[in-house]
Amino acid sequence: MSVNIRRFHQVFLYQSRAPVPELLADLEVLAGLDARAEAQRRALAWSGWLTVIPGGAMALLAYGVWAGAVNADERFSEAGAQLLKTVGVVGGTLLAVGLCLFFWRVVLKVRDLDNRRYGLAQVLLQRLQVDLAPDATVRLKLDLRPPDVREKRVKQDMVGWWNTDFFVDPWFTLEGRLADGTFLRIHMVERLQKRERSKTSASGKTRTKTKRKGFARLEVSVRVKPERYPGLEKLKARATAATRLPRRVELERTRVAVDRLSLRARLSDEWVARPEKALDDPEAPAFWRQALEKDDASRTATMMLLSLYQVLGYARRRARQQAARGRRESV
């Protein structure tokens, strides 16, 4: 499926069911659109400053000279008046052009996507590709809008003295059937609170404070055939004990049923899709070390899936042992 760029720039939603190579190709298109938007916004910022600063200086200079001459009751020569007028017009034009460039940059902000979102999809698809049948299709749904758009606000309330907007953003869903027949689902939701509080001082000045806080929930679940894993619903304690997660990532919930297993973990809102360098690399710059300290969402999802497969493997081995024991007793 090829990305309809015009439609995407209207809704910023991506949804497709296709083989992994096609999904990865679409994500490369989205990454290219994001890179182009970032480059355009950088160019507009530089162009805006390079026109606003000299334009504002020329306009202020022309106005200052004119105001000084008026106050001093002096008259300009015809050439001087023409020069002053030219400087003022050019300065005002540059200032207006610069402001238009900044406005255009603000308009393009919505096209500057969160790199982590499509980046996480790329990493997970690349890792899962080896566990899928060659012609298997995967369903991928991405909501690349910011988490604080009006459509994602679920309520407004007071938290202490803060006026608070609550946002819920279920932005990521990946579903597919693995080569062994297991149905896999990975789902991620971000929750955000935007808080605002105003205070009026004794002098009558009003100061407004704002802050944001949030977190992300990552859920990995598998659905299997009950006859292949008998007794799976009794293994909740083992599933919880078998779960391994990166440092600082918190396991929130474990669910088991006759035909499914599910783990849900809580990550910081500053999670990363995948760090680029190892933490013990002495050549890693300081900003990469800071990034590596953040929660790695792709590693978390991978470890959760491996933990679920450990439980499935235990259930399968136990079923075989019980069947073998039953055959021996019947002899």
Image (tube, grey):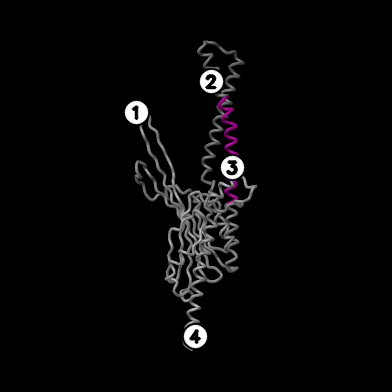
Residue ID for mark 3: 40
CA separation, marks 1 and 3? 46 Å
Magenta-tinted stretch: 31-57
Q: Nearer the viewer, mark 2 or mark 1?
A: 1
Label 2 residue SS: helix
Q: Earlier in the sequence, mark 1 or mark 4?
A: 1
Check disc 3 and give the amino acid type.
Gln
For disc 1, the neighbor class at 10 Å (few under 14, some 14 to 19, many from 20) is: few
CA separation, marks 3 and 4? 73 Å
Residue ID for mark 2: 63
- Which numbered circle lies on residue 18? none
- Which numbered circle lies on residue 202? 1
Comparing 188 with 306, the one in front is 306
Label 3 residue SS: helix
Q: Nearer the viewer, mark 1 or mark 4?
A: 4
Residue drawn where x is 52% and y is 65% of the image:
176
Check disc 1 and give the amino acid type.
Ala
Label 1–label 3 contact, CB within 8 A: no
Within the image, what quadrant is residue 210 found in?
top left
In this view, 99 is above or below 311: above
Q: Position of residue 39 (x, y in %)?
A: 60, 43
Q: Position of residue 11 (x, y in %)?
A: 49, 51
Q: Earlier in the sequence, mark 3 or mark 4?
A: 3
Check disc 2 and give the amino acid type.
Tyr
Residue ID for mark 4: 328
In this view, 154 is above or below 178: above
Residue drawn where x is 40% and y is 33% of the image:
207
